């Protein structure tokens, strides 16, 4: 018995996705399997005028909302120079201790991912928040761009922004402090 008859008996039908020329379901399943176990979240293939896009959701970090947004047309990106490596065994001062001493009641909002920090939705728009602003839980504080996706970072608690620790359009690391919020 050939494979087509066996597939038909099980109720599986081999069919084209995009008309006469295109990809069949087996080929699409192969694309899905290719994505598994990789950091790639989507792939688009075009063959004979037919396009197939396979995407999978990679869960964002808690407290983030994914927003697809075109990059700013003429936003200058600052040159990024990596910090000089610290000597082996030498303590590294990241400045976090000085912030805690200056604002003992404040809680730090940290970056949930590596990316680029933006204080506003576009270069000519007003910033989401400024120092001294009172924010509510769930309010957007900034955007972190990671792999061309704009991720809104929301306040996890209500309070007053006492310090913004990052300059606009600068790279940030996972866990880096972005804001200090003091309960009101």
Image (cartoon, helix red, strand yellow):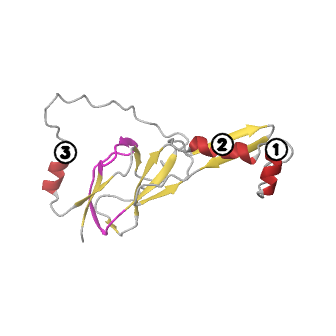
- In three-dimensional space, the C-alpha distance between marks 1 and 2, rounded to whole angstroms, equals 21 Å
Q: Position of residue 107 (x, y in %)?
A: 24, 61
User: Residue placed at 76% from the left, 43% from the top?
Assistant: 23
Q: Position of residue 43 (x, y in %)?
A: 62, 42
The earlier-in-sequence mark between 1 and 3 is 1
Q: Nearer the viewer, residue 174 or 58?
A: 58
Question: The C terminus is located in which quarter?
Answer: bottom left
Residue topped by disc 2: 30
Residue drawn at 79 percent across, 45 percent down: 3
> Number of labelled discs?
3
Name the one closer to the observer, 6 or 61: 6
Q: Which one is in front in this view, the residue at disc 1 or the one at disc 2?
A: 1
Query: What residue sits right under mark 1 in the picture?
Result: 2
For numbered disc 2, what is the local secondary structure? Answer: helix
Q: Which residue is mark 3?
A: 95
The boundaries of the magenta stretch are 155-177
Mark 3 is surrounded, within 10 Å at the Cα level, by few (under 14), some (14 to 19) or many (20 or more) other residues, namely: few
Separation of residues labelled 1 and 3 (CA atoms) = 69 Å
Residue 6 x, y percent position in the rendering: 79, 51
The label shown at residue 115 is: none
């Amino acid at each position: 018995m050939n494979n087509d008859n066996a597939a038909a008996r099980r109720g599986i039908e081999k069919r084209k996705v995009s008309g006469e020329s295109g990809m069949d379901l087996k080929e699409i399943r192969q694309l899905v399997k290719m994505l598994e176990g990789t950091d790639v979240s989507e792939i688009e293939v075009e063959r004979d005028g037919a396009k197939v896009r396979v995407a999978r959701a990679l869960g964002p970090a808690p407290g983030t909302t994914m927003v697809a947004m075109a990059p700013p047309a003429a936003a200058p990106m600052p040159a990024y120079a990596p910090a000089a490596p610290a000597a082996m065994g030498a303590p590294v001062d990241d400045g976090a201790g000085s912030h805690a001493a200056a604002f003992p009641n404040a809680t730090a909002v940290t970056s949930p991912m590596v990316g680029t920090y933006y204080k506003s939705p576009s270069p000519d728009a007003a910033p989401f928040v400024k120092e001294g602003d009172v924010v509510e839980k769930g309010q957007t504080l900034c955007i972190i761009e990671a792999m061309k996706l704009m991720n809104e970072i929301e306040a996890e608690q209500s309070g007053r922004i006492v310090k913004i620790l990052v300059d606009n359009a600068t790279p940030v690391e996972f866990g880096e402090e972005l804001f200090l919020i003091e309960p009101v």
